[in-house]
């Protein structure tokens, strides 16, 4: 038996490739399915089954694309009217050599959510592994804000966890669909290894909770939903995403060509660090740091108009193309060939704003016209914030600009400075004359506070 | 937290590299330590601790070499008088960032055997992972034939398993020092994923056994010990193996140079398939198929004289060098550059013997001067054999040749034909005029038997 | 400027990827075009031109497939009525950044053959590089037996070489479409580096030849044409080969499934070494050693019926799939999963024949019923052969079997033993009871002869 | 014959690995010699000769280290009293299989400079390839400012080129020791492919020059010599560089540890882009952009004191370690683990300066207290500069600071903005209160000028 976890960087989405003998099973494939075709060749087998734990909302699922280039069946839950594949129900199973895959219905994250268990029949019919989708994560549980009434969803998830998943046994290995950093669970551990038993005992959402407490905790999570989620859900239900065998490549564009696009009103998203962006950028461009691409690009990229990206140095064009491809932004069509320097060396106009540290923030705050703009998530605000700061989640900023005042100097702040950079770029694009990005953000603020306290 | 399992191919030995923050820990390093230095660079950390679960006997442990190129401490058990490193005892622990490594004394496989547990202090002091060395494997338990009186060793191991390891909790992930195919446990599953709980419930050696039954089962295992084990134990206790940063490369030799070495009485070990070897080989050479190198090379290679190897097509010289390096055969010094074909094309003499299938075996057995020579292990004979076959384990064959009769035609047989090929090469080298290798071996024999039965 | 030579292993076909700025040019792409798409991404450019030096006959050209996944133009010669692309003529040129690609018409190998020159305009309009297709190789010149009357073709080629290619200048770097080992030029050096001047001075076909001598030399070359060449020529002219973005994978088959296919009369081609094959093989299978796949597979594989292959150990399924894909054998559909051993271990019947060395050959030749069957190429026979040997080129053997006598013992012989193995497998399949493969072949025979002479 | 060009990134230094049969030759090895040991394994051969075209001054040559891990001879010129290796003289040669390496004495760049030719004896004794060291480059010739009286050195080089190298033949392939971007020849083409004939005809230094013109041209080149060159020359002459098999790794340091080092006066060199650096950096740190590491690090790093580096995102620690290792800065000992962000998030102080574009420069220049500081090389000034700019080469800046006035606002300018970033960091470290880096630099300035002219 061979098992490989394929993690979509940025999304922290896990898919799984499991092979035995001449067959393989893929669970929750990502859209750039060449990865699985490559594994198929390396392991000299045929992908015969594609399992979907649920309809995903944060990325284009690759099931139909993968089916198009193999002869595999697609299996998924029966509670949703998928326009493709085969619905399965509790206790359905199939075998690949000595491995048995069985279906457990575990609604909660979504009504059609499934857990697939894998048993090694050489040892036992009892499950060795549990592929739980978005029901249970290492250190967290799945979101319940995506359908129906949240209390009902949370209760349903609790029942699935306690009555379906935990009973699989403490000894069963846990294989969830997301890892640390995913937008599908804010508190997922950055480690991937766990078991049902470890989660039963030490997962903060499960360990000390009864049904009521669990529902209350879920209600407090305050997740956010980027606008592209709707399209994903729809595509993934209808199986209607355009199909590719290899992810398409973005077109290389000269500085002149980008300038032309900009002058036609097209959007530029600059993937460099907030520091580099602050010092100099294409006027009007939006800054989404590279590691934040999967999490934040979808908030600021238009769904259909053409978009150009600026790559940081040493960024892999292939990796960037794949990340955007997975989010379904087939409209992102070009990148600035040669990087930002070609823009400056061609003598195109540069914009900038200031990056500041804690002592500069403190000094600025003595002015009357200065305000901290805290762009973290509601859940983060709840854990502490700077007095008198204005709170708008960065994803909401484009639609909340009219609430702000251009004569105010805004110090954009997030936890460390990445989302602050996005926010500053949005304000700058909107014509706010004085914007700052607070490098270090609330993390640095707290350190300073602690240092002062210790000094006192 | 990053964890990587590094498996020494052939040996099926697992070492582990675990890093967090700016430090890393290596457990049971192999001798070619450049692998860990490479990981250190990739993960931008410093190896600060090297853990030895026990003194290994089947390979040169790389602890001292790795220490030589880092500044790491070496920790191991106190029951053995190691000439290097720091002895630790039960409940000792150290921390790397939020990870705690703790010591559990688990004698049995050897008296000084340790289990190291890893806890993720962000969640619990309870162990998340157990690095159990050779105490417990996926589907098997460690050998107890290597020290003292076997009954005593088996009882000691049982106590460690039941009183020390199982109590770590069903939820704890299992990280043993060997996987399927190792000589350190004959029944290890080919799968690497398991938990303490899965083993507690489904490991055949543990699930239904009490202490007495366990000891009885262990006694039946009938392991074999290649002659090089003694040197390994000694080197690993004294830390006296020669140290290298990169494994040394074998010298390329022309067919003429190999011929010269052969004529001086040096040994040639031919790593091609038994089929290719049977058809044509260097007179006097011994055939150890490539995948069997780590398991069988040490039975037939002299400990100190120079040895030449013949590589199969597409074999990696690097991989072969490393495998031999790990076994401590620093005396293996050259390989036939260009492969076997250069030998034949240079018009050197070729020897051969016949490869036969089941029907040919059956036909030959009608002759009076034919005997099946079953070279499998005692444990395999116990599960069935061909009537009237002569049984000598292939590793014992060199010292048992005088028991055999050169006027007899020997059909060498193992489970499928690899060790049969070794055996046939040994007889051929010894001047037996009529030797055969039975391709398919006892596996094919049983199929035929079953087919006949079904037909009847 | 970035240039990469992409060599199709086995075929020794060279294609070239040249990029500058945001564009790239591909010359004579192979069919598995994902290689170029990968380079496009790595070099962050767009393939804008595909150049064909001529209609190829030994492999499926990838131009149309590559065009299908890019927006590139295809350029080729005007003397052939291609069903796709754009015809170009002498002195046409285009530029990519500071690189100028110019067309030189160099008929000879085929009437529409072109040479493309590349000039670095930063230095000179004079050519820096010459992409000469199959006109000129390192140490050889292109075949002239593929069209029209050979004397005419050879004369035409001579004129192109002397009047078009050599005048490009001694200093120009040579980039031919094939390297050592290709069937498109028997004497190509195994080295790839050369210049127009080096070939002018030291290429044996050019250095000391006038037009008449050149034609005479070409006439003596005696090339052979595998049956699949016709289909290639046709596909490549019409651009009608099926298009794939990634080469399709062969289906893994169990020993049982292969047995079933064999019993239905399907062909098996076994890619193991001649030694391994001789010792044991699937009855009726044909042996084409792996490195000979591109050169000899096309002689023995049926064009349309399904074929199964047996892979040697450590062979890359990806590499084998690609090689077969390039030859256009889309009908090769399966491989024996797990390799030959699964066949023997499942107790299926094994056939074998003997592999012999020179002294065994000499001894056998004393019998009346023994004959050497020399299956080398006509050009090789011309350089020497064994007295009284029977000469049939291995590619002609299937259609010449009726010329042979089943009561004769045939010693199959080629230069070293690979094609001898093919021949022995063909005779064996045809029911010849006594066949041998001479390992070392004519190479070993000559060594022995030389040794005898020196001894005398 | 296998040949591979190994280019040391940054240095643009080319070494060559050439193998045939069971031997290999390495020409001008870099210090991190594991690359060659790896090639040795991959090509299954032994490195038997190490050739040095001359004593290098810009990097630690790896000859003695490579010899230490092989059994190779080191060959070099006899005009210098090397403390190791074997001196060779004109017409000496050795053979590896059918390849002949011959010595041509080509003084000029240095007195002991050699050219090694390679002939393919299967074709001719005439050279196929010329390994010319630093005598001749693609589009340029070697420096002659490093020894003796420059006119004499230039004349000597001219004689070697015209009387020794060009006579090797137009057809010979050129393999120089440096490519585009090297400090050893300012005008080297970025392309690596050339021939003796192409250079004879189109190299601007050779094509239209007689001896006098050549000497005059060389005199005008105005090279610069970083301070570490002296140590390199000495080490390379004495063979006294410390020897490593694998390049040592830098130590990961926390932000706190770096802060401690900084407070003790240790230097920090920050390898991020000038944009990112300008926005925020560790107070007192020097900015050398990553691609400029090999060229500029050696100007600003102390030779013996400990140094810490800050890596940009996605920089390879291995690559950075190797580059520093090649320059001999064994004193660079640590890097900021986790990158610059850990510094800011730990709330350490940030410094910054402004990055400005052309229109901002133009506006600033209207002030009286503003001056352009042009830090390009003398040879670049000669091709044009901004009126009234102050000219100090960036490498000389640390020793020329007293010539500058802290009350002046300096706009640091180079060709595009990298060296301007270095300069601004030096001024900033020295306490100049108002410094700017001109992004786009003289390149952008000229574009704007041209745009204005066209507009006019």
Image (cartoon, coloured by chain):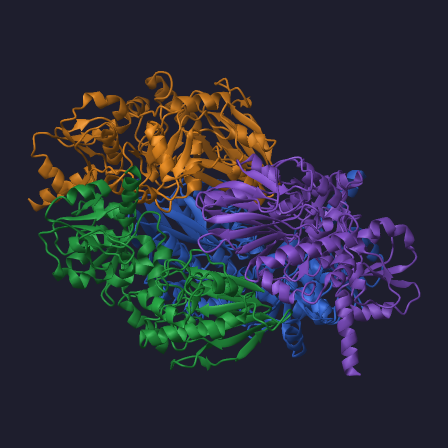
Chain colours: A purple, B green, C orange, D blue
Q: Quadrant of residue C352?
A: top left
Asked if residue D411 shows in the view, the reply is no
Q: Quadrant of residue A442?
A: bottom right
Q: Is residue A76 visible to us here?
A: yes
Q: Is residue A364 above or below residue C116?
A: below
Quarter of the image containing the N terminus of chain B?
bottom right
Q: Is residue B298 above or below residue A234?
A: below
Callout count: 0
Instruction: Please name whichever residue, D437 or C134, is drawn nearer the observer in this view of the structure.
Output: C134
Q: Give residue B175's position: percent from left, percent from top.
A: 48, 65
Residue projecting furthest to the front: B456
Quarter holding residue B60: bottom left
Between A18 and C424, the one lying in front of the other is: A18
Residue C176 location (% of width, % of height): 42, 34
Using the image as rendered, state which of residue C56 and residue C161 is in the foreground: C56
Tell me what residue is drawn at x 59 percent, y 41 percent.
Answer: A75
Work out which quarter of the rendered image holds the C terminus of chain B and state it.
top left
The residue sitting at the top extreme is: C149
Give the side of residue B238 with respect to residue B253, left or right.
Answer: right
Given residues C42 and D69, the one toward you in this image is: C42
Q: Position of residue A379 (x, y in %)?
A: 78, 61
């Amino acid at each position: 038996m061979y098992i490989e976890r394929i993690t979509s960087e940025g999304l922290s989405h896990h898919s799984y490739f499991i092979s035995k003998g001449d067959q393989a099973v893929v669970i929750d494939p990502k859209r750039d399915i060449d990865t699985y075709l490559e594994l198929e060749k390396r392991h000299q087998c045929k992908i015969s089954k594609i399992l979907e734990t649920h309809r995903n909302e944060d990325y284009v699922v690759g099931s139909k694309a993968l089916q198009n280039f193999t002869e595999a069946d697609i299996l998924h839950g029966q509670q949703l009217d998928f326009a493709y594949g085969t619905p399965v129900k509790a206790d359905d199973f199939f075998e690949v050599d000595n491995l048995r895959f069985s279906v457990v219905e575990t609604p909660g994250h979504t009504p059609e959510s499934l857990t697939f268990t894998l048993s090694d029949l050489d040892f036992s019919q009892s499950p060795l592994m549990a592929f739980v989708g978005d029901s249970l994560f290492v250190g967290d549980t799945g979101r319940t804000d995506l359908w129906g009434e949240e209390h009902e969803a949370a209760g349903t998830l609790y029942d699935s966890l306690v009555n379906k998943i935990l009973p699989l046994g403490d000894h069963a290995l846990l294989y969830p669909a997301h890892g640390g950093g995913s937008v599908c669970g804010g508190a997922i551990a950055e480690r991937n290894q766990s078991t049902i038993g470890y989660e039963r005992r030490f997962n903060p959402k499960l360990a000390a909770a009864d049904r009521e407490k669990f529902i209350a905790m879920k209600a407090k999570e305050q997740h956010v939903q980027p606008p592209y989620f709707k399209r994903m859900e729809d595509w993934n239900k209808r199986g209607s995403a355009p199909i590719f065998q290899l992810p398409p490549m973005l077109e290389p564009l000269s500085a002149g060509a980008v300038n032309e696009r900009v002058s036609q009103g097209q959007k530029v998203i600059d993937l460099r660090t907030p520091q580099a962006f602050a010092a100099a950028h294409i006027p009007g461009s939006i800054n989404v740091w590279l590691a934040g691409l999967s999490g934040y690009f979808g908030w600021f990229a238009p769904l259909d108009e053409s978009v150009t990206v600026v790559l940081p140095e040493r960024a892999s064009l292939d990796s960037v193309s794949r990340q955007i491809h997975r989010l379904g932004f087939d409209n992102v069509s070009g990148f600035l060939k040669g990087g930002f320097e070609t823009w400056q060396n061609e003598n195109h106009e540069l914009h900038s704003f200031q990056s500041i540290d804690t002592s500069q923030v403190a000094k600025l705050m003595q002015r009357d016209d200065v305000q901290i703009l805290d762009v973290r998530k509601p859940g983060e605000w709840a854990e502490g914030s700077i007095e008198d700061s204005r709170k708008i989640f960065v994803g909401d900023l484009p639609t909340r600009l009219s609430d702000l005042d251009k004569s105010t100097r805004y110090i954009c702040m997030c936890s460390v400075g990445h989302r602050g950079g996005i926010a500053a770029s949005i304000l700058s694009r909107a014509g706010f004359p004085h914007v700052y990005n607070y490098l270090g953000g609330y993390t640095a603020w707290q350190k300073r506070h602690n240092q002062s306290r210790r000094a006192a």
